[in-house]
Image (cartoon, grey):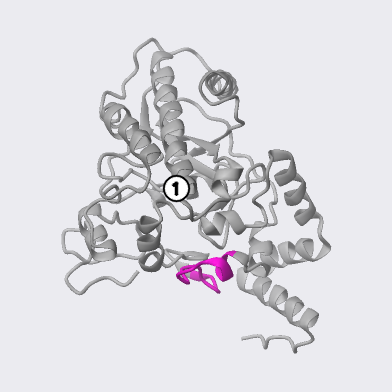
Amino acid sequence: MTIPPDKTWSHSPDGIRDEGVVYRLPQSEVLPFLVGSTSFDEDSTSPANDEFRRVIYGEQYPQLHGAVEPLGSRPEWSAEDLQRHVSDFVEHYAAEHLESRLLRVGYTPVLRDHVYTDGDLTLPNAIVLGLPMRYDETNAAPEPRAGEEVTRNYMELGGLTLALGVRLREHGFSAEVHHPRGDDAMNCEALFVPHAIAAGLGELGRHGSMISREFGPRIRLSMVTTNAPIPEPSERPTGVAEFCSWCTKCLEACPVDAIPAQRETRRGSYRFIVDTTACLPYFAETDGCGICIAVCPYNKPTPEDSGRFADNVIDLDWVKQANEIRRSRGFEAMERFVADRKAARRGAPPAAAP
């Protein structure tokens, strides 16, 4: 992001940004600079969006700043007990409120490197929730109904997240809810995607969204932090990093060239970094955009379709080879291997090693 000369967007006392930590970008400063507005919600293009936002702002946000302390006596639960109770609760909530749509639930210790410097987050563990957006609506991007689906998902997932926080407190644990759309200022205390990846829900795609096995990139995230015991995060190979090094569909489809051709290192992490100065104004103009999600090859109509595609990627010989290179020699060596393979398929000479 290109920062105006008079803005550091740093909460450190001396106003100097440290690339080793995560700074919140205050909405009051970022939005006027990027989109000439103080709110994403001015001039809404959709009556449905207005209703979803009314629920989020009028009913859900006021619940975010209440007590986090337990309401009942704490049971002697193991991490497995907690996981079973959370799974049962999420399943019943989805059946009653979400048309039994499949959700993902993951667990990870809070990642202090991905908590905002001015965040007040003290509970040690995170339960990460992922709710898929509907396929047909998402694929309509950038039409208004795609933006409606984004906001609907925020509302639906926000309701679940609040309900889970209350349930944990009723069972004797402290719990703080982190809404998928943030809070009143559209902020939150931590970054969801790194926590979801650490919890085993997926891997980062070129387009900056997490790609999950069941839903591809059509998944929105939220989080509840708690002192309840949690199971160990699950890990399994995904093939996403290798496939995204090969695939450029989202890069080619982005109307504002916000998606990068190469990874770069930021805060010690080598990854694709979306140009938010290009993405955010178009996102606001279209009330949600989502073109990159719609064109992603991992975006399939059903969890079964997505799972088969993901498994087929992992089973590709060149993906297995690229994955081994990444593990033994690092990301950049893997990228050179993938680039050379693409060049060979085009009949071009391989790229020279640095």
Q: Nearer the viewer, residue 133 or 116?
A: 133
Q: Nearer the viewer, residue 281 or 185?
A: 281
Q: How many marks?
A: 1
Quarter placement of the N terminus: bottom left
Quarter placement of the C terminus: bottom right
Which residue matches tag 1? 147
Would residue 330 be seen by someone viewing this image from the given angle?
A: no
Main SS of the magenta part reads loop
The answer to whether residue 113 is left or right of residue 29 is: right
Residue 245 location, x and y as percent? 64, 68
Relative vertical location of residue 295 with respect to residue 189 in this rendering, above or below: below
Which residues fall within the magenta stretch?
A: 250-264
| Residue at x-position 23% and y-position 72% | 4
Residue 164 location, x and y as percent? 44, 23
| Residue at x-position 27% and y-position 40% | 120
| Residue at x-position 35% and y-position 67% | 277
Crowding at mark 1 (Cα within 10 Å: few <14, some 14-19, many 20+): many
The answer to whether residue 230 is left or right of residue 223 is: right
Residue 227 location, x and y as percent? 41, 27
Would residue 215 be seen by someone viewing this image from the given angle?
A: yes
Q: Is residue 175 magenta?
A: no
